[in-house]
Amino acid sequence: MYAVIKVGGKQYRVSEGDEIFVEKINANTDDAVTFDQVLMLDNKVGSPYLENVSVTGVVLKNGKAKKIRIFKYKNKSRSNRKTMGHRQPYTKIKITKING
């Protein structure tokens, strides 16, 4: 059994036992979280969401992703070189149950 859920503006295909990385949510480690925005369950498609269906998970970890480097460069103009970095915060969740 699998489901497609919407978390943080993105869609994830999950099944029981999966571990997913989502946008940071306000939850501590070992907290139970429930996702009510289920778009699809096996072959049933909602419009836009399915009713009486939820996905439950446990927060494993809050953290930051690996740093990515951003370079801004203008050709033949040495004055506008710029190096920046960014680390996106995330939450790692283990899916425990799909109710539906």
Image (tube, rainbow, N blue to C red):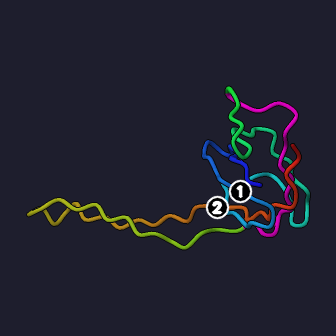
> Quick one: label 2, few (<14), some, or many (20+) residues within 10 Å?
some
Q: Quadrant of residue 28?
A: bottom right
Q: Give the residue displayed 87% in from the left and 56% down from the top.
A: 97
* The N terminus sits in image quarter: bottom right
Q: Main secondary structure of the magenta part?
A: strand
Left or right of 84, for residue 58: right
Q: Position of residue 8 (x, y in %)?
A: 66, 45
Q: Give the residue displayed 64% in from the left and 52% down from the top.
A: 12
Q: Are marks 2 and 1 in contact (CB under 8 Å)?
A: no
Left or right of 32, for residue 22: left
Please identify the residue farthest to the left as the structure is shown: 76
Above or below: residue 52 compared with residue 68 = above
What is the C-alpha distance between the residues marked 2 and 1?
21 Å
Above or below: residue 20 compared with residue 25 = below
Q: Secondary structure at mark 1?
A: strand
Label 2 or label 1, whichever lies nearer to me, is 1
Q: Position of residue 19 (x, y in %)?
A: 73, 67
Q: Secondary structure at mark 2?
A: strand
Q: Position of residue 67 (x, y in %)?
A: 51, 72
Residue type at tag 1: Val
**Which residue in the structure is indicated by mark 1?**
14
**Any magenta on residue 60?**
yes
Residue type at tag 2: Pro
* The C terminus sits in image quarter: top right
**Which residue in the structure is indicated by mark 2?**
89
Viewer-closest of 39 and 10: 39
Q: Which residues are magenta?
A: 48-62
Viewer-closest of 61 and 75: 61
Labels 2 and 1: the sequence-earlier one: 1
